[in-house]
Amino acid sequence: MIAEHTTNTNVLTNTSSQIEEADLAISIRDVSKMYRIYDRPQDRLRQMIWRGKREFGRQFWALQGVTLDIKRGERVGIIGRNGSGKSTLLQIIAGTLAPTTGKIVVGGRVGALLELGSGFNLEFTGRENIFMNGSVLGMHTNEIEERFDEIASFADIGDFIDQPVKLYSSGMFVRLAFAITTCMDPDILIIDEALAVGDIFFRQKCYRRLEALCDTGVSILLVSHSMMDIEQFCDRALLLNNGVPLFQGPGAEAVKHYLLLEQGDRSSKVISSLPDEMSFDEVDKYQNQNAFWPSSEAFFDLSHVAQVTNEWAKCTGVALCNNKGQPCHVFQQGEIASFFYEFEIFHDMEVPIGGLVIHSDKGILVHGKSTLEHDSDVPHVVPKGSRLRFQQDISLEIAIGEYTFEPGFATMSYADYQERSEFSYIELDTKIMRLCHLPAAGNFIITPPQNRFPIQLLHHGVANLFGECTVTIKASPENVP
């Protein structure tokens, strides 16, 4: 089944045959959505009477010029501030809202989890809503009956399946809605913040189901304010701001662009907070000419890396060595790796912050730490034109496999730095201004260790969490004196 929504035939489009040949689930071409805003209710009536001959309102563009192709089996995130047009775009894709201009071709059955409780009749029971939603999706009664047990089992709401859904909690709503939508054989699944509700066990269960659906070729569009979800689950992401596409690319990179956007006017605040006269006397203390720095062959080629920056700094070098200072890209599990990265700064600043994150081959964030967590000795002021060098040594107690790493650079005021231990981690994040980030700057491989005791592989899973395990035997009652 091909659902096609169109309003402007002059816009470049894909036909249904083209979308199938290109292995695309969704093709969006220059889609925009405009609303008319009226200051007074009577102006809306006047507009209807005059039929466009005179304007009584003003135009508001919720979306402008969105072009996006989504392949079958691809996971795409849509991120942005509140009011950026995310939900509007999802509603257009779902067919519940028509675009003002542009064209969208959707290939296949669409399942949508939009607003909490949408698609439900509150007076119907859960069972009745299952059959109603199945019918809306074009399924026959016998098809729905075949899937009913699977839906009820996944939702796991017990006897409430035969109670009116108006009695459901928000968590029960989401459980049933997710079960219905994912069990009805969608070709495209749209999720708008729905997974923010529910306990951790249900969220894990949902993501396992989503992974399984992707493996069968189902395309997933996810809107979330959880940047961790976007970074770890989505292959790509689209960043919207005031209805306009700002960035489209890998999920982790899109998140970094979003975080820079969220900083807003923080740069002007940082500049205004700088002292009128900055003393750079202490800079000499950190200018160590004898500090080790790797040879040229240890450095990665950064020409292909798109640096995410606000133009305050740029990365000029990234290297990886073993604990002997030799260039190395293959490490045995548990060995020490030394990461080196250098940033050139273009503005006077106070406290510099350098950090590094490591991702698995599946995009899972394995480790992230900065000079703040290390409580490193850092200068309190740095003049523009300086080149700041960082060396970060990490014990690679992580799973066997291939990883990428990403250096980053930020700054904060000296006043906030002095109070850093008093802030919650959420408050601290608002005090930091991100300056530069290098997505997937380099990679390395972890192999099994050659000599480990008591066995070669010392842990399962992503990371080795240090701890102890003891064994005791409970005495039998007849042996107790």
Image (spheres, rainbow, N blue to C red):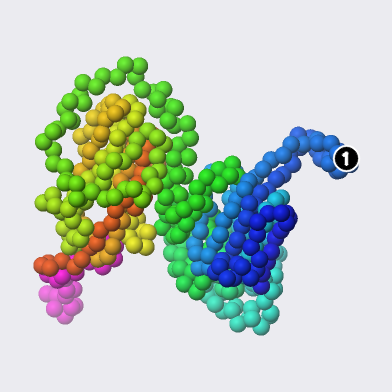
Locate residue 431, reporting x and y percent: 38, 34
Residue 25 higher or lower than 325, as above or below: below
Residue 217 higher or lower than 89, as above or below: below
Three-letter code, disc 1: Trp
* Label 1 SS: helix
Locate residue 143, reporting x and y percent: 64, 81
Residue most extreme to the top: 277
Residue at 55%, 47% (x, y): give it: 245
Residue behind mark 1: 50
Locate residue 291, reporting x and y percent: 13, 38
The reply to whether residue 175 is visible in this rendering is: no
Q: Main secondary structure of the magenta part?
A: loop
Q: Is 251 included in the stretch rendered in magenta? A: no
160, 2: nearer the viewer: 2
Q: Which residues are magenta?
A: 453-481
The reply to whether residue 170 is visible in this rendering is: yes
Q: How many marks?
A: 1
Locate residue 309, reporting x and y percent: 40, 39
Residue most extreme to the right: 49
260, 184: nearer the viewer: 260
Task: From the viewer's perspective, tell me whether residue 469 is left or right of residue 262.
Answer: left
Residue 349 higher or lower than 355, as above or below: above
Residue 256 higher or lower than 344, as above or below: below
Q: Give the quadrant of the C terminus.
A: bottom left
Question: Badge 1 local density, few (<14 within 10 Å), some, or many (20+)?
Answer: few
Residue at 60%, 73% (x, y): give it: 184
Residue at 34%, 19% (x, y): give it: 275
87, 419: nearer the viewer: 87
Q: Give the quadrant of the N terminus.
A: bottom right
Task: From the viewer's perspective, tell me whether residue 168 is left or right of residue 345.
Answer: right
